[in-house]
Amino acid sequence: MQCSIRKFYYGDIPEEQGGGAAPSESMNEHGWPLWEVFIRSKQGLDHKHAGSLHAADARMAIENARDVYTRRQEGISIWVVESKNIHASDPGDAESLFEPAADKIYRHPTFYDLPDEVKHM
Amino acid sequence: MPVHHLEETFQQTVDAEIKIEAKDWMPEAYRKTNLRQISQHAHSEVVGMLPEGNWITRAPSLKRKAILIAKVQDEAGHGLYLYSAAETLGMSRDQMIADLHSGKAKYSSIFNYPTLTWADMGAIGWLVDGAAILNQVMLCRTSYGPYARAMVRICKEESFHQRQGFEALLVLSKGTQEQRAMCQDAINRWWWPSLMMFGPRDSESTNSDQSMKWKIKRKTNDELRQNFVDMIAQQVKLLGMTLPDPDLKWNEARGHYDFGEINWDEFWNVVKGNGPCNRQRLQARINAHEEGAWVREAAVAYAQKQSAKQKKVA
Ligand SMILES: [Fe+2]
Ligand SMILES: [Fe+2]
């Protein structure tokens, strides 16, 4: 689709409106890989994905994650995983993977009508 | 699937308020617009550290210094959340930074104004962060998932920014004659540039509302600006100060404050690179990047050495 957005919204100044030189040839990649950060917010809870960052190695990734994602006591434990090691399901497969669960309502406790006398079950 | 089909499905997803995620199909213009907007937002957070960083060494007390450092550190974090969100759209961090340094990518013009007195730290927190918050609260509901999540995290941290700014001004407003004058002067200088943060008037643009249709944006510039004026016009009374606009007055019929005309020549002039500090800000970023190059290289060399050592042991 060749429709480009030209409305000048807050925080979206079109690039050609600006001064500045033509982009210089791209700089050397600094070679710091991307890491995904998982934080355990308190004892007893799972680590949860918090975000990502670049770091030269795992130790630096943990140190940076601590500075970026736990400045307000958001965590007590950090996991970092290099992003390239995360394998994800394909959004295109979502239907075939997850939809079959939709009609299996008998997998939920609410499917079963029991007499009130059975109190807690 | 044919493209028009994909587009239809995409629009339905957006209309149903279901977030778009990085690996989902999206129209190229949606990707580009988000990429431009998120990376500009990231650059704004990073360049935005400079005007306040200017006062860290000169904060009037240890308490104010600690607060200012915490705020500036938050802004660095905001930059990082946003760069990460932008990277999910397929541009490398290095490329984004290169685009900032070359002048191709923009950042918010507000940061091209100088911070002349301590009171500017208060005015920035109250007005500049205040304006940013209105935009960011809206963006918590933006349609692109990684952007929305970054915004939720950012909004949690922002409210302290505005409060500390207002409180710093409140203290000055109760101070000596000189302190009160300093407070009023900072408000005078930051008021109009803060209004400009919301961008051109809605009527300026006859172009499509695609950004709204895709729910990247959910309020127009003028709506956000009006919200801002209504909020600040009330709060300024608590400071016993005034806003530098003779046309500012409550409009009973509209239920909003009317306000005067913004100097759009100034706005475009600063956007085009001719504001008071454009050159200085960009140069400071470029210097920081270049002078930090050896640190980045050393970290890579160290990481490689360590992993080689580990392999030997194993
Ligand atoms: Fe921020
Ligand atoms: Fe802020």
Image (cartoon, coloured by chain):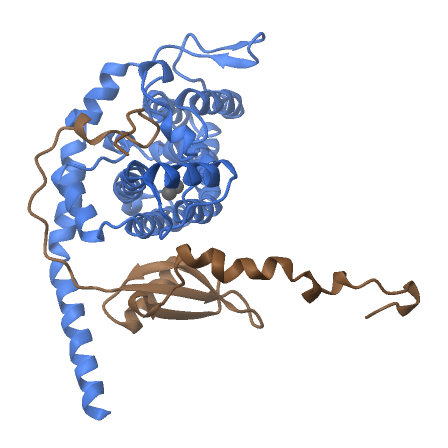
- Rendered position, B228 above or below B22: above
- Residue A65 on image: x %, y %: 36, 63
Residue beneath the point at 10% across and 52% down: A27
- Rendered position, B89 above or below A75: above
Task: Give ligand 1's quarter of the image.
Answer: top left
Which color is chain A depicted in? brown
Which is more toward the observer, B84 or A74?
A: B84
Residue beneath the point at 30% across and 46% down: B56
Which is more toward the observer, B59 or B280?
A: B280
Which is more toward the observer, B87 or B14?
A: B14
Residue beneath the point at 45% across and 17% down: B242
The answer to whether one can see residue B141 in this image is no
The N terminus of chain B appears in which quarter of the rendering?
top left
Chain rendered blue:
B
On the image, which quarter does residue A92 sit in? bottom left
- Residue B282 on image: x %, y %: 16, 39
- Residue B48 on image: x %, y %: 29, 40
Residue that lies at the very extreme toward the front in this rendered image: B1
Residue that lies at the very extreme toward the bottom in this rendered image: B313
The C terminus of chain B appears in which quarter of the rendering?
bottom left
- Rendered position, B153 above or below B263: below
- Is residue B214 left or right of B35 when viewed as pictured? right
Which is more toward the observer, B116 or B73?
A: B73
- Residue A103 on image: x %, y %: 63, 58
Residue that lies at the very extreme toward the right in this rendered image: A117
How many numbered marks have been drawn onto this rendered protein structure? 0
The answer to whether one can see residue A11 in this image is yes
